[in-house]
Amino acid sequence: MASLKGKTLFITGASRGIGLAIAKRAARDGANIAIAAKTAEPNPKLEGTIHSAAKEIEDAGGAALALECDIRNEDEVQDAVAKTVERFGGIDICVNNASALSLTSIEKTELKRFDLMFAVNTRGTFLTSKTCLPHLKRAENPHILTLSPPLDMHSKWFAGHVAYSIAKYGMSLCVLGLSDELKKDGIAVNALWPRTTIATAAVQNILGGDKLMRMSRTPDIVADAAYLVFAQRAKTFSGHFLIDDTFLAEVGGVRDFEGYRVDKSMPLAPDFFVPAESKPPPGVQIARLSELAQ
């Protein structure tokens, strides 16, 4: 598999969770990581800052650039990209990981919350991709990877949290359109989504607390899948909506997924937006909704 040594990744929301896991996986090869995230000071409810993430990346073997950046702000994104290019000489990979989450019904969704999710998820993905684009065009094997789901237009994925679903699928629509638009430039544009819930702050604080954390996989599974995406030839591998374990099994040859589980005594909880026709790899059992309620 091709190494990411010397390659530069611009990752939004990389101060913790999935974004940080992707960064550290690339850092093991000796990659350069631009951490574009808002958290510069410690927060009692959220583990990690851009500075603690930079240390973890450097400890893993990479070079890190901590960038305080709100991807809702065009000037901040442009400044962060410019600083990345000044420090590392270019950008090879853009990872759209930052996302805002609020699972509320239409009656309970304030418009400022709708605007936040759209600004971070959809607009932020578009803006970050657009700003990185001139540099990606000069890269040897350029990739844009967005953490967003397959486009499964089923009402069950919208009812009860319409605002979030619109914003999240907006990220996927960016993938759909850009994969075709940027084909001529040889830039791969793909989406990656976890089959199960992932043990992150969002799961702990918003979705299900300690129990759902124990029913989750670690961010490492998404990081390993992302690393495998980056190894693909950009000119021929684009426009895919990938589910982490299926991609690792079919392309990476992974057969044992037990090491990714937080607690092997607990069933695995399914994530939102995974299409019914997407079946897990052999030997992987996903909990039924009735088990989640117990």
Image (cartoon, rainbow, N blue to C red):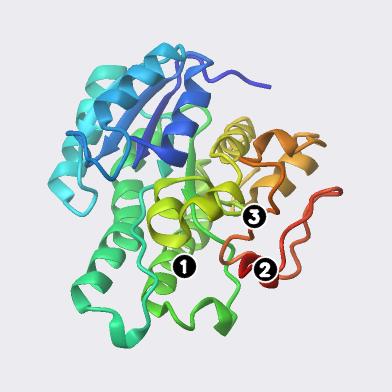
Coordinates of residue 35 in the picture (x, y in percent): 31, 31
Which residue position is annotated with label 3?
195
Which residue position is annotated with label 2?
275
Badge 3 element: loop
Q: Is residue 191 visible?
A: no
Query: How far is disc 1 from disc 3 in space, using C-alphas?
Result: 16 Å
Q: Earlier in the sequence, mark 3 or mark 2?
A: 3
> Which one is in front, 77 or 44?
44
Q: Is residue 258 visible?
A: yes
- In which quadrant will I find the C terminus? bottom right
Query: How far is disc 1 from disc 2 in space, using C-alphas?
Result: 13 Å
Q: Residue furthest left?
A: 75
Q: Amino acid at mark 2?
A: Pro
Q: Amino acid at mark 3?
A: Arg
Coordinates of residue 157 in the picture (x, y in percent): 54, 76
Which residue position is annotated with label 1?
169
Q: Amino acid at mark 1?
A: Tyr
